[in-house]
Image (cartoon, rainbow, N blue to C red):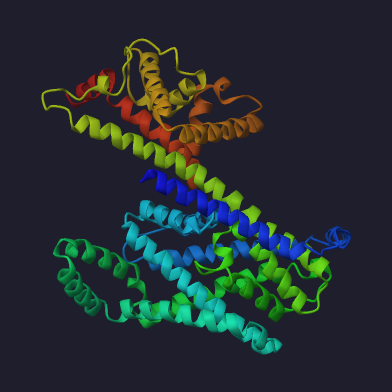
Amino acid sequence: MKLHSNLRRTVMVVSGIVISVFFIAMSIWYMEWGYVFEALSNAELYPWLFFSVLSYLTGHLVRGARTRLLVSRDAKLSLFTASNIVVVGYAVNNIFPARIGELARAGMLCERTGISFVQSAAVVFLERVLDGIVILLLLVVSALFLNAGGSVEETIYFASVILGLAAAFVMLVVIAPNRLMGVISKVIYAISPRLHDAALRFTTSIINGFNYMRRPVDALKIFVLSIVIWLFDVGLFLFLLPAFGLELNVWQAIFVITAANLAVLFPFSPGYSSPGYIGPFHALCIQGLVFFGIAQATAVGFAVVVHLAIYLPLITWGGAVILWYGITLGLTINLAKKAKTIAELPEQVPVSANLLGSTSLDKESKSTSAFIFQLTEAALPLDSFPLSDPRSVVSYVADFIQREIKNLPQKFQLLFSIGMFCFNMLVWLRYFRSFSLLSLPLRVKIFNSWAYGKLALPRQLFRLVRSTALLAFFEHPSVIDVLENKKV
């Protein structure tokens, strides 16, 4: 089974690469590269590239607002978190073929909100349907204004059929969920009673994913947001046109971006299997510009720059989110395993600090780094507890944190190391000394500003140290004695 799965993934990746190479070759086979380099060298990217990227990234904030609304009946998400979830999906799509990012997006939405994966996937599917409908609408309008209907007639017809079926399914779920549930219940029970309950749970999750669309006002709000999203995406193309000496034409920008995106939207379209849509996206973008009489060399240069304007910001933003998210997820999984181990112990075994560490309580572990020790010392509320030997407590907690980090999967250890390296670099730039060489009061101040500050990303990074340190600290016998004496 695993062999077949690996084979499928290999075929998917190879096919994506082959498709990318084919479309790139098709686009540049007869290209005179001297003209392309001339177009790129003559391009005045400042300030147009800045406005282009800003418009595109703003569109992703609006995408986050849409996701936030769609799950608002079942979970609360901040705009920043919802936008991060969306960007992670797009970033993964830029790396892996076959829209694997949609699964990553659904998985992260599931983990961040607590709703089921099926419901999360239904939300992602709904967003894709809305995107497809808006893209098709904008393409039709721009084609009418530019008198280009004949050239894209087949694409519009094909997309209308597919999106019409998807929209009909969404409307059925939104308008008649109970009837849909009844039909599925009868059909599944007649086929296989054993699958009945699982099928109903699956259907319920899908229905819940479309819950926000039941009120016409809310559905209209989501549709308007979807239009705004793609108008910001149009800005990505529009603001780059003057950089290549082209006319600032809104309808041409709409036509090119919608035609290119619509052609890579569906699972069986050529660009679907291509990582980052490399190749098919460039080919369609070049064809769209050439259609309006723009020189092919200029069109190639434009396509390269606009794809980089999409690719690099999303990889940077998405990579940063994956870094912090991976650290948090690794900590959560590790602590969950630890809690499960403790819960499975016999009742007569006392749950004490010895369960959390394997070294002596009074002996500092040689494996604990000086940085982790100093970081742990800054994390613990030592001033609130009159401990007889605070250093031994800090040593114990630091040793426990060090082992917990080593127990994480290697990729999470790497993410944590990168995060701590960046933290140390910022501290050094601020104080011209490493964190370990600073005084304890200053280390406490810095730690609290990162672990409990207003910015979410530093809090996510330091959650591993903060949570693990407090867990071990309050299980230490010396701390337990102090707490018991206070009660007395």
65 with respect to 18 (left or right): left
| The quarter of the displayed image where residue 208 is located | bottom left
Residue at 63% over, 24% down: 433
273 and 212: which one is in front? Answer: 273
479 with respect to 301 (left or right): left
Residue at 61% over, 54% down: 17
In the picture shown, does residue 460 fall above or below 366?
below
Q: Residue furthest top?
A: 363
- Residue 473, percent from left and from top: 33, 25
- Residue 444, percent from left and from top: 48, 29
| The quarter of the displayed image where residue 468 is located | top left
341 and 484: which one is in front? Answer: 341
314 and 27: which one is in front? Answer: 27
Can the viewer see residue 408?
yes
- Residue 81, percent from left and from top: 46, 55
| The quarter of the displayed image where residue 303 is located | bottom right
In the picture shown, does residue 155 fall above or below 88?
below
Can the viewer see residue 275?
no
170 and 377: which one is in front? Answer: 170
Residue at 29% over, 34% down: 337
- Residue 63, percent from left and from top: 51, 65
104 with respect to 53 (left or right): left
In the picture shown, does residue 216 fall above or below 5?
below
